[in-house]
Amino acid sequence: MTQALIIGASRGIGLEFVRQYRADGAQVVATARSDEGLAAIHALGAKPLKLDVSDTASASGLAWQIDGHAFDTVIIVAGVYGPRHTGLQSPTASEFDDVMHTNVLGPMRVLPQLPDYLAPGAKLAILSSRMGSIGERSSSSGWLYRASKAAANSVLKDASLLLEGKAICLSFHPGWVRTEMGGSGADIDVTTSVSGMRKVLAGAKAEDNGSFHNYDGQRIAW
């Protein structure tokens, strides 16, 4: 049976990953910070784990909770946007810490715990954003979020080098999705975004390791 691990699945894109993998008969382990999120995961027939990637003690306890698993797919979804600055406005220290601890330090805490729990040929993804691309950047809005996603891309690239031959690692732009973060005026719904990313992951080959993709498979410049 296929096994999937979703980090950050209390709602939106993360919970939709749980829903779709469960609908396909996969065994799913998924994390959330809140009791409401854990209940939503459980309601879909997945195994809920309480995890806060921004908290050192919580994040460091992942490995023992997934002992015995061999995941075919791991997707790190957990992320926050932070202040919606439109210009050169300095974030406060607490804003910086919140965004960077969740979007960058979070994956850096989770990834080192995973190698022993990956099935041969596993697929591993981090949800980034086109806003993190430097090569395609034409706006500075949300510059703290942009900086965090550029850093998350760097983390994914390093993971792809360290896990080469053991897992195929991808960074994803999920699209502008109608979620709490994306807002009601976004381009696509979560079903379209997640089904697209799952298709790309399923078809990913060794030569795709360490690459950055749109949800529909189009490559994005770093």
Image (spheres, rainbow, N blue to C red):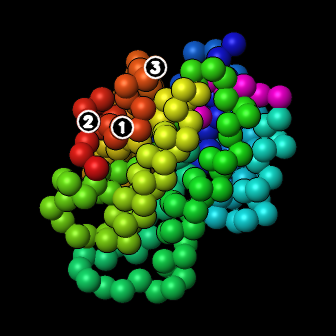
What is the x, y in percent for residue 72?
62, 23
Report the residue marked by disc 2: 219
- Judge depth for marks 1 and 3 and give the one in front: 1
Q: Amino acid at mark 2?
A: Arg
Counting residues from the start of the chain, the first of labels 2 and 3 encountered is 3
Asked if residue 128 is positioned above or below residue 119 in the image, the reply reads below
Q: CA distance from mark 2 to mark 1?
A: 7 Å
Q: Secondary structure at mark 3?
A: helix
User: Alpha-carbon neighbours of circle 3 within 10 Å: few (<14), some, or many (≥20)?
Assistant: few
What is the x, y in percent for residue 203?
41, 18
Asked if residue 112 is positioned above or below residue 192 in the image, the reply reads below
- Judge depth for marks 2 and 1 and give the one in front: 1
Residue 202 marker = 3
Magenta span: 68-75
User: Alpha-carbon neighbours of circle 2 within 10 Å: few (<14), some, or many (≥20)?
Assistant: some
Q: Amino acid at mark 3?
A: Ala
Asked if residue 27 is positioned above or below residue 93 in the image, the reply reads above
What is the x, y in percent for residue 120?
63, 20
